[in-house]
Amino acid sequence: MKSLAKKIWLDGKLLFWQKANVHVLTHALHYGSAVFEGIRFYNTDKGPAIFRLDDHIKRLFYSASVLDMKIPYTKAQIKKAIINTVKSNNLKEGYIRPLVFYGAKSLGLYPKNLPVQVTIIAIPFPKLFAKTTINVKTSSFIRLHPHSTIASAKISGHYVNSILASLEAKKAGYDEALMFDFKGNIAEGSGENFFLVKNNVIKTASLEDILPGITRQSLIKVAVDLGYETDELELTEHDINIADEAFFSGTAAEITPIAKIDNIIINNGKVGGITLQLQEKFYDIVHGLDEKYKEWLTYVK
Ligand code: PMP
C-alpha cells in the first residue's frame, strides 16, 4: 500500500512504512483479538502536542487487560515510543493509532501463550467529516449488549458492529450512524459519543454500554467549567425530537455538529450556539491556547 507516513513502530523498532508487516496467522486478523487507541496531536506554538496521551495509554492497558493480554512494555515505554513515532515522521498534526494484538502461533481461538505484539502508527489526519454539519441515520443495528462484551474496552472485534451500522447509514445517503442499546436508549455513533442540548443542559448517554470517550469526558469537564449543567442519563428517541442541538464527540470526529437525525432537522440545520462555544473552547485547549487545561497536553520535543 501507499505510505501515509515514513515510519511505523512495531514491536520495539521503528521500521519504514513498507516493512511493517505481520503474518497471516495473526490471531487478531482471524478473531478481532486486538485493542487500540485513537489519539490526536495538534500544532501549537511549542511544537506538536498530543492530547490526553496518558489517559489514552491508560485505556489501552485497561482494554488489553480485558482480553488478558500482557503488553510486553510499560506505560512509560509506550509513551516514549508514541512520542518517538510522531517525531520520526516529522508530523505537526495528525492521528496516532497504537494497536496491541495477539500474534501468530496457531489457529485456535483460545489465546493461550500467544505472542502479544504492539504497533504504533502516526499519520496526517484532517477532519473526519469534511462538512460543517452532518446527517445521521439511526441504525437498525443495536450496540453490543453489555452482557455480550465489556463495552468500556476498546476492542477491535467490537468494530464489526460499528462497520455494519456505518455501511447501512452510508448506503442510505447519511454521513454517520447513531446506535441504540438493547433497551432502546441512545447509545453512541459508530466511533463517537453522542450529545444533545435541551434548554441549555448538555446531555449525553450514561456509561453503560458505550465506550467512555476521552473527548466525552473532556467536554463534560469543559462544559461544567463554562457554567453549564450537564447530565449523563438514559436518552431516548423522544429526546432527539425535542433537542435544541446535537453533536458527536470523539478523537477522530472532535466535535461534529449534527444537522439532521433521520427526518428530524435540528436547530434549523445550523450549528447550535452551545456546540459552537464548545468547539471553540476545544480548539483553544488542543492548540495549547488555554493555560487552564495545559496538563492535558504532552509536547513532542
Ligand atoms: N465511541 C466509540 C465506539 C469510539 O470508537 C470512539 C472513538 N475512540 C468514541 C466513542 C470516542 O472516544 P474518544 O473520545 O476517546 O476518542
Image (spheres, rainbow, N blue to C red):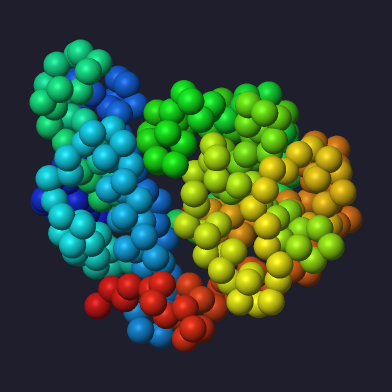
Q: Is residue 102 left or right of residue 266?
A: left
Residue 39 at what x, y percent from top left? 39, 57
Vertical relation: 8 (above or below) 136: below
Residue 130 at what x, y percent from top left? 62, 54
Q: Is residue 8 left or right of residue 181?
A: left
Which quadrant is home to the C terminus? bottom left
Q: Quadrant of residue 28?
A: top left
Vertical relation: 292 (above or below) 24: below
Which quadrant is home to the N terminus? top left
Q: Is residue 77 left or right of residue 131?
A: left
Residue at image point 69% right, 35% down: 185
Residue 215 appears anywhere in the view: yes
Residue 64 at what x, y percent from top left? 27, 40
Residue 177 appears anywhere in the view: no
Residue at image point 31% right, 36% down: 66
Q: Quadrant of residue 224?
A: bottom right
Residue at image point 21% right, 31% down: 102
Farthest residue to the top: give it.
Answer: 108
Q: Nearer the viewer, residue 232 or 81?
A: 232
Residue at image point 13% right, 27% down: 114
Q: Is residue 183 left or right of residue 163?
A: right
Q: Nearer the viewer, residue 198 or 4?
A: 198
Vertical relation: 225 (above or below) 170: below
Q: Quadrant of residue 231?
A: bottom right
Q: How many marks?
A: 0
Residue 255 at what x, y percent from top left? 61, 60
